[in-house]
Amino acid sequence: MFEKMNIKGESRSAYSVAFMTLGCKVNQYETETMEGLFVSGGHRVVPFEEKADVYIINTCSVTMLGEKKSRQIIRRASRENPDALICATGCYAQLSPDSVASIEGVGLIVGTQDRGRIVELVDEALRNKLAGGEAINDVGDIMRAEEFEDIPLSRMPSRTRAFLKIQEGCENFCSYCIIPYTRGPLRSRPLESVRGEARKLIEAGFAEIVLTGIHLGAYGRDIAREGGNRVTLADAAREILAADCGEHRLRRLRLSSLESIELSPELITLIRDDARFARHLHLPLQSGSDDVLRAMNRHYDKAAFARLVENVRREVPGIAISTDIIVGFPGETDEMFEESLAFAREMSFSRMHVFPFSARPGTPAARMNNQIPSAVKKERVHMMERAAHEMAEKFHAAHIGETAGVLFESDSGGIKDGLTGTYVRVYTEDDVRLGEITEMRLVRLHKDGVWAEKNDEKIPWQGHDLT
């Protein structure tokens, strides 16, 4: 393919492109938009396992492990096809472009901005590769970014749930987190664009839309209405819930991770009053010790978090609340860890993701004294994960015998699985259709979720066949 290309760009041949995504739902959404741009440009997107002309790795930098995996995937692509162009994009590329450029085979580095020009940049890099040039570094100063990079979906995602990114950037600067340095300041997608992209997804038949962002709860702070009031996340949710798409209707709207202090009364009311809103909130706690929360530069204490959870559960009975916990933060004593563990149990989370502290160079926490030994962090992870398993099982058991709408996502050897609105994983052998929300009776605990049987009543299929 490369030999057929005109170095001056006077003509262009189609080529195959393979993607690999590491990290969060935002990265997954951004990969989907880039895939659409290549397909619109006449190119062919192929599985990453296939030999491709171009490999694009959407990297992660939230932990050292994420960076390590990013480097491994880049080297894997180079081994698969030494003649291919390899493009690294995403957070690790933004944070350490020179380090990424030094990896053998990399010909293009694009950060967390400028993805709307990805096809143009790859074309340029292909010509540069043929001419024997060095890797092209397109990474700019993300802290100067001022507007949301609005890349319309031009190809429907090949999944059962549709992610919709509406917000970019973070200004919280938690002491352990590198993301504000890789994503820049707050930028929000305009409401009219949110509405338009949601309509595309609903018209395509997606039963569920998941709203995502780097700092989702900050959506709209940079968008002023007439009179000076700011747009809010609740406004964006209402735009989607009110979308009129003819015969198609949205069945479920879900929020991705949301800071507890940004869960407004207006949003709680909307979740309570509209049955299409998933009864699930992911509210990162990070620690149940006030001393650790202060060191983390989190802007709440555990009493405020507990009051918020109590209020949400009172307003929306049966809601699932999941969370993230970091263990082994610098200076976390045994007593602080025990306090955090006890508070997590007190909150009775439906699901809890546990992470050992990962020192990110350039963050205040990486320079703190009293770093915790790896062996201690490993033991604390084990203890917290055991609590997480017990809480999840208790939450699942409480719903045995009930019926729930399940959006089925995959089929493995005749065993189908999917998610309820409360984010419980459901398994069945019954005849259900992927991408469809089907009413199921939850009958017993199974693996990391529950086993279910089909009810006679089901929500009608909306026309998006992803089998």
Image (cartoon, grey):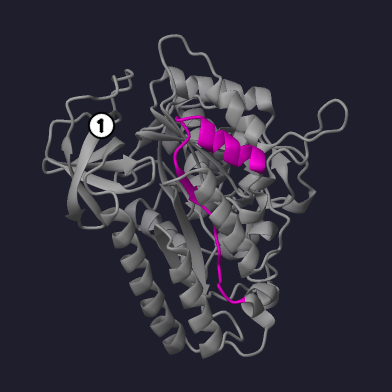
List x then y, in percent, for residue 215: 64, 50
Q: Which residue is mark 1?
A: 439
Q: Is residue 272 magenta?
A: yes
List x then y, in percent, for residue 267: 61, 39
Region of the chain picked out in magenta, as a range: 265-289
List x then y, in percent, for residue 442: 21, 44
Left or right of residue 193: residue 162 = left
> Is 314 above or below relative to 334?
above
> Is 444 above or below relative to 390?
above
> Is 176 above or below relative to 257?
below
Q: Is residue 267 magenta?
A: yes
List x then y, in percent, for residue 20: 41, 48
Residue at image x 37%, y 67%? 388
* Quarter the C terminus occupies: top left
The number of numbered badges drawn on the structure is: 1
Which SS class for mark 1? strand
Q: Name the kind of residue labelled 1 in the image.
A: Glu
Look at the image and tell me whether residue 87 can be seen. no
Near-viewer residue (98 or 249): 249
Left or right of residue 138: residue 324 = left
> Is 203 above or below relative to 3?
above
Left or right of residue 379: residue 104 = right
Residue at image x 44%, y 57%? 74
